[in-house]
Image: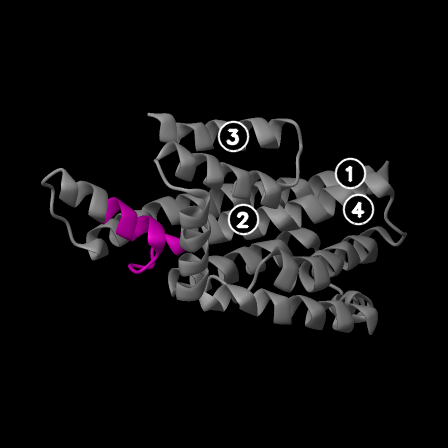
Amino acid sequence: MLTLLGVATVVVGFAVRLNPLLVVTLAAFVTGLAAGLSPVEVLEAFGKAFNENRFVSAAYLVLPVIGVVERAGLQERARSLIARFRGVSVGPFLIGYLAFRQLTSALGLTSIAGHAQSIRPMVAPMAEGAVEMRTGRPLDPETRQDTRAMASATDNIGLFFGEDIFIAIGSILLMVGFLATSGIVIDPIHLSLWAIPTALIAFVLHAGRLILFDRRLRRRAGA
């Protein structure tokens, strides 16, 4: 039970708003020490996990590229691109992105988009541009933050409910392994198939939220 102190460390660390990376690292050390490992053994576990998942280091290559293209005016280009489509509003635009995110996640392409890769540099600016095109005036700070938050939420929901359809995703394999330890043998494909109705319901519910969000922005602009 002492190994659960790592979970308590995460809860307390996030509650006091410490650096997330520091909190997770500290929680790993607390869990390892509570399990009887030495500090060196905990570091070895970190190194082994990093070595077996080397693709994680790809983020250090992607982030500078995103910074360069943003400095070169990527967000402005995204806004000007969406402005060419006069009939597009923020609701249908984000619904289209939601469908794209769910479909690609269901195929296992979870890293093809995300907050750093697509939301901040492209999707959020395009959503803001769609709102500005509809209202005919620059966004006020509240509307801008609401639009960015809805774009981020759309990515979260599309990824969360789409990735469980892919049979090789970690959550599916975890459930299969847990059930197997209890004597319940089930194929991963069965869990994936049962994730499809949930993903469809999530799509319909969030699409409805996006439509209501679009209408609320129009009323706000009219006021």
Q: Main secondary structure of the magenta part?
A: helix
Marked residue nearer the N-terminal end (1 or 2):
2
Marked residue nearer the N-terminal end (3 or 1):
3
Q: Tell us which disc is closer to us: 2 or 4.
A: 2
Q: CA distance from mark 4 to mark 1?
A: 15 Å
Which SS class for mark 3?
Answer: helix
Residue 16 picture location, percent across and down: 65, 27
Q: CA distance from mark 1 to mark 2?
A: 26 Å
Confirm whether the magenta stretch covers residue 121: no
Q: Tell us which disc is closer to us: 3 or 2.
A: 3
Left or right: 171 with respect to 59?
Answer: left
Marked residue nearer the N-terminal end (3 or 4):
3
Marked residue nearer the N-terminal end (3 or 2):
3
Kindly identify which residue carries mark 3.
9
Verify CB contact (< 8 Å) between mark 3 and mark 1.
no
Kindly identify which residue carries mark 1.
219
Verify CB contact (< 8 Å) between mark 2 and mark 4.
no
Q: Amino acid at mark 2?
A: Asn
Q: Tell us which disc is closer to us: 3 or 4.
A: 3
Which SS class for mark 4?
Answer: helix
Marked residue nearer the N-terminal end (4 or 1):
4
Residue 85 picture location, percent across and down: 73, 68
Residue 39 picture location, percent across and down: 46, 44
Q: Amino acid at mark 1?
A: Arg
Quadrant of the rendered image containing residue 121 = bottom right
The tag on residue 8 is: none
Q: Which residues are magenta?
A: 162-176
Q: Is the N terminus in the top left, top right, bottom left or bottom right quadrant?
A: top left
Q: Tell us which disc is closer to us: 3 or 1.
A: 3
Q: Residues within 10 Å of mark 2 (few under 14, many from 20)?
A: some
Kindly identify which residue carries mark 2.
156
